[in-house]
Amino acid sequence: MNNKNQLENNTELFENISPNIAIFPENKTFTNLINKSIEIVTVPKPENTNINQVNVGIVLEEKLIYKILSKYYKEVLITEIKTKKDLTKLALRKPDLVFSGVKYFYFNSKKIWLNDYLELNDILYIASNKSSLLKESNKSRAKKIMQKSNITTAEFFTTAPGEHKNKKSLPILFPLFIKPITGGDSRGIDKNSIVHNYLNYKKKVLEIKKNQHSRCLVEKYLSGKEYSVGIFKDNITGSIEAMPIEIIVKKNINGNHILDFNIKKNDEEEVIAVLDIKIFNQLSILAKKSFIALKGKSFGRIDFKMDNLGNLYFMEANLMPGIRKGYFYRSCLLNLNINYEEMILKITANGLH
């Protein structure tokens, strides 16, 4: 960031900075560290790195985050939770903040949601709680919540193999877009996700059931531009900051623009700032309304798409967005002109409030 105020040895001022201002020193560390304890909480990683850990919403670069936070805060730890006893010890230590992307743990066949557990123990955390995460994780449920809030979504229905036995039984006309009803990172989305006939519809629904073990969300296909909007909610004032970006994907072999799993994985899409002020404002208003409807906390990401007439539609939300170098980070970079370290510090400062 250009022309930033230099905060030298001024812990009190730093602690009182609103997370929406995000003023941090460049290439400096405080001699007087902020007297806060932060634990970066992770779970054991699978041996097969291709496995999707469904209980982890944000995959952290914990060593890098540790390095960043240690420059500013007095006590920073990386804690790997393997057992219920580890979680109990964490609660007894009572850190000022838990920085984690873990949604829940399975201990003795029981699911324990981390952020709700932290709330019960009066420990602050960085993202949303169980109630909000359940609202957004099921794409059909999220769309119904949007509709109740007068936010337009594409026409949709849900299905599984055998439920719609012929073309006439489909509630929406072709072309259709088919994806898993749960899950992120465009898993289950590929060049065959747009279908123009009943045979291809059946094939894709069956494929998602077999590979993603999920019901399908079937939407009216929208052929327009694709957007994502990063969100910061100030935990002190309640004000919400929207950071729209446009995602551009080249045509695939079928002549369609699809943000599929492989394009995301290989980082082949182009991400640009939204320069049209009218569209920027429309996206900002819709994203803020969507975040409020889902009762999101601290930060998140809301996705939209246009039809061929330029109308915007809510697609899905992510209240635990990736914070490595994905869309949330790029929305911060393009809208706030802050780098990765500054983004981590902004998330942390907001969490501590």
Image (tube, rainbow, N blue to C red):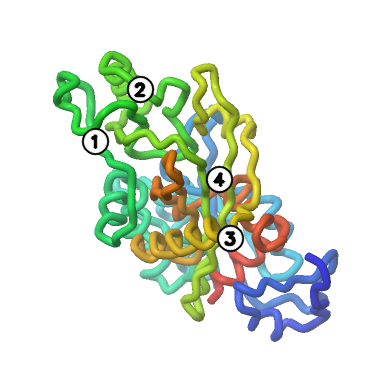
| Type of amino acid under label 4 | Val
Nearest to viewer (mark 1 / mark 2): 2
Sequence-wise, the earlier of marks 1 and 3 is 1
- Whole-angstrom CA distance, mark 2 to mark 4, is 32 Å
Dot 4 surroundings within 10 Å: few (below 14), some, or many (20 or more)? some
- Whole-angstrom CA distance, mark 3 to mark 2, is 34 Å
- Whole-angstrom CA distance, mark 4 to mark 3, is 33 Å
Nearest to viewer (mark 1 / mark 3): 3
* Picture coordinates of residue 126, whole percent (x, y): 51, 63
| Type of amino acid under label 2 | Val
Dot 3 surroundings within 10 Å: few (below 14), some, or many (20 or more)? few
For disc 2, the marked residue is: 195
| Type of amino acid under label 1 | Thr
Above or below: residue 298 compared with residue 313: below
* Picture coordinates of residue 283, whole percent (x, y): 49, 57
Sequence-wise, the earlier of marks 3 and 2 is 2
For disc 1, the marked residue is: 158
For disc 4, the marked residue is: 59
Sequence-wise, the earlier of marks 2 and 4 is 4
Closer to the camera in the image, 247 or 255: 255
Closer to the camera in the image, 160 or 259: 259
Nearest to viewer (mark 4 / mark 3): 3
Secondary structure, mark 3, is helix
Work out whether residue 88 can be spotted. Answer: no
Sequence-wise, the earlier of marks 1 and 2 is 1
Residue under the image location 69 percent in, 71 percent down? 73
Q: Name the side, left or right, on which 30 lies relative to 227.
A: right
Nearest to viewer (mark 3 / mark 2): 3
- Whole-angstrom CA distance, mark 4 to mark 1, is 29 Å
Nearest to viewer (mark 2 / mark 4): 2
For disc 3, the marked residue is: 277
Q: Which mark is residue 258?
A: none
